[in-house]
Image (cartoon, grey):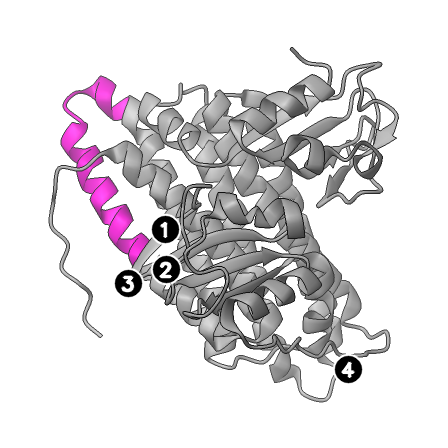
Amino acid sequence: MAADEVSYEPVSVKELLAEMKDTAELLIDLSYSAVLLGSTEVAREVLELEEQMDVLQLRARMSILMAARSPNDAERLAPVLGVVGAAEKISDAAGDIAKVVLEEVGLPEEMRAALPEAMETVLRAELAAESDLAGASLGGLNLETETGVRVLAIRRAGDWLLNPSAETDLRAGDVVLFRGPDDAVAEVYADATGEPYDHPDRPDLEESDLDRAVDSIVLMKDMGELAVDLAYGAILFNDEDVAREVFELEAEVDALKSRFEAWTLRAASRIENPVDLRGLVQLATSTEVISDAALEISEGVLRGLSTHPVVEEAVYESDEVIVRLVVGADSPLDGTTLGERAVKTETGMRVIAVRHDEEERSWDISPGPETRLDAGDIIVAKGTRAGAERLGALAGQE
């Protein structure tokens, strides 16, 4: 299929960067979900979004090149080109992950068994005309508060609505991407389509030599996603500390990749069909690319180059913001758990990682209600700006 022709148009670089950020984050969610569900429909959505990203990055590069008129401009815009290139790499890596499904590349059952524990379910649903959701706004439905299910994006007449707001309405024929706990997403899917959702069978497997390899790649996935979130946070706050966290996470992903390779090579000699490991290797390679891209996004901050205002504004104007907070001594969060304090309910923020104040500087990736917080712990969370203020107050920060 021939690629669509792209020519220069005067467009806002800020808007292009914001759309690229939102698209890259959505692609990560969808690509792993395609593998988890074995869904060719979700995998095809990934490839469509990847094509859209190709157009966005070309337009962004054209606009940035038109803006560079002096050596000073070149110095300030170089990190912007880095952000554009990194988002494109994330897009390409997500496409490669989706092709594990579309091209039926071998994937061991151990991987499908492990992924449900590693991520929330993402489902694609086409809204039926008779659905009670049709004609309602997201704010009116209040899905996330009532069910824990979030609308990631909507495809309407071929166009994508990324990070829809409370005012966004749902219409019959919309293709909606829902994310949340498996049972809750299944109920929303049934409400949206009028059809029951068939849960994919989870293999019941005994311990095998692949377990450690699979554990490594699942942790790589979690760390890579966290690195991307932190990288955009480093840009938003021009925060070198956050950028250093990205650097450390990327180094840890590299170390995990080495361990993954060792365990996979050992397993290859002990399984009936080593060809089934091809998909696992492809997943690991693409996941490492995502963490490398995160480091590229934050590289300008690490090198002491001030973030260009257009990038700061693009990240800030994204519907979701990222915050890094330190739990204050004697604050409402000190000595409690996320569940006991009902942080998500009270603030609307999703805590995506906690770094405990220990010598090992250990990360708790994708923390749950049982995760304990103590003074000195670092919280990384995503949500609205209003929610970030509420979380900051709980952490004891003005």
> Helix, strand, or loop for circle 2?
strand
- The span from disc 4 to disc 3 (Cα, nearest Å) is 49 Å
Give the CA separation, mark 1 to mark 2.
6 Å
Q: Which residue is mark 1?
A: 161
Magenta residues span 52-75
Closer to viewer: mark 1 or mark 4 = 1
* Prevailing secondary structure class for the magenta stretch in the rendered image: helix
Residue 386: x and y, percent? Answer: 55, 25
Label located before the other in sequence (1 or 4): 1
Q: Which mark is first along the chain, 2 or 1? A: 2
Q: Could you tell me if the residues under marks 1 and 2 are in contact, i.e. CB atoms within 8 Å?
A: yes
Q: Amino acid at mark 1?
A: Leu
The kind of residue on which mark 3 rests is: Ala
Residue named by callout 4: 270
**4 vs 3, front mark:** 3
Mark 2 lies on residue: 155
SS at badge 4:
loop
Which residue is pictured at 29% across the width and 23% down the height? 75
Name the residue tied to disc 3. 157
Secondary structure at badge 3 equals: loop
At label 3, counting other C-alpha atoms closer than 10 Å, the crowd grade (few under 14, some 14-19, many 20 or more) is few
